[in-house]
Image: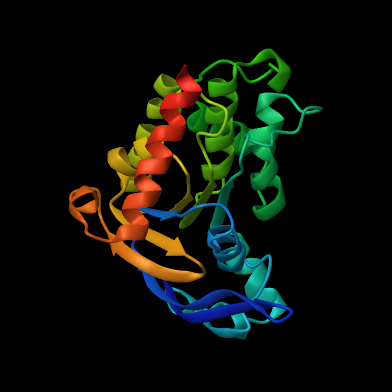
Amino acid sequence: MIRVENISKYFGQHKVLDNIDTVFEEGKCNLIIGKSGSGKTVLMKCLVGLIYPDEGYIHFDNRILRQLSKKEKVNLRKDIGMLFQGGALFDSMNVEENVMFPIRMFQKSDYKTMRARVDFCLERVNLSGINKLFPSELSGGMQKRVAIARAIAAQPKYLFCDEPNSGLDPQTSIVIDKLIQEITKEYKMTTVINTHDMNSVMEIGENINFIYEGKLWWKGDLNVILETDNKELNDFIFCSALTKKLKKR
C-alpha cells in the first residue's frame, strides 16, 4: 500500500500538485489519469523518488519516503519495479541480460540462481526461450513483455508503469493490460499506472485517480466512472475516446 498524504509540489511560483491525498491499494491496478499538463507525471515522479514534494508525505506501507536515510532509500528501491514508456530495454544487451539487470543490481546471487529467475519471469510473460535474442529482433509487444519480466525480476512489492500501452495496437494493449493485472494480483503488488488509454481504464481500473489542474478531482473505479456527473472527467473521457477514434481512421 502507498499512501499519499496531502502532497504539493511547486516549480518556481507555479503549484503543479495541490494537496493530493489518496491511497494506492495493494493487489490492485491503481490508475492515474488526466490530460497533459495536469500534474500526473509529476505525481508519478514524486512516488518513485525522482523528485520530492514540497509539502506532505508519501508512505510506502510503514516507511515515509522523505524521512528515510540513504541506506533505507536503497532498500526501498529494491522493492520497486519500473515499467517505462516504450519499454526502455538496453539495446546492447540480449533479453536475458536485460531481465537479469535488476537482479544483479539488488541481489547477491550466483549466475545459476539468476538464470533460473530470468527463465521463470520470461515464462510468466509467455516468452520462454528467447533469452539470447536482442530487443531489435522483437516486436513492440514482445519488447513490452520483456520489460514487464525485467520489472518483476527482483520480486518488487511496488510496480510503477508509465504509459505501458504507448505505441501498441489495441489488441496488444489488451494483452499487456491483462498481464499487468494478473501479475499484480498473483504477487499482491501495489501497482500504479500512469495512462491516457481509456481502454485500460475500462478494463483494469480498479482504483482510478483523475488529476485535474494539479488537484485530485475524482476518485473511483471502472464500475462507476461512466456514471459520474463530474464535468471535467466527462470531458476528458469524451476527448480521449474521440482522439482514439480519429487516430484509427
Which residue is rendered at x = 50% and y = 24% of the image? 247
Which residue is rendered at x = 81% and y = 27% of the image? 92
Residue nearer the viewer, 212 or 59: 212
Is any atom of residue 28 visible in this view? no
Q: Is residue 1 left or right of residue 226?
A: right
Which residue is rendered at x = 63% and y = 16% of the image? 138
Is any atom of residue 55 visible in this view? yes
Q: Is residue 160 left or right of residue 231?
A: right
* Image: 178 above or below 45: above
* Image: 204 above or below 145: below
Q: Position of residue 249 (x, y in %)?
A: 47, 16
Q: Position of residue 62 (x, y in %)?
A: 44, 79
Q: Position of residue 26 (x, y in %)?
A: 34, 60
Q: Is residue 117 left or right of residue 25?
A: right
Q: Residue 115's image quarter? A: top right
Q: Position of residue 194 (x, y in %)?
A: 49, 51
* Image: 3 above or below 164: below
* Image: 14 above or below 132: below
Q: Residue 99's image quarter? A: top right
Colour approach in the figure: rainbow
Which residue is rendered at x = 66% and y = 54% of the image? 106
* Residue lying farthest to the right in this orientation: 92
Q: Quadrant of the N terminus?
A: bottom left
What is the number of callouts on the image? 0
Residue nearer the viewer, 215 or 55: 215
Residue nearer the viewer, 81 or 195: 195
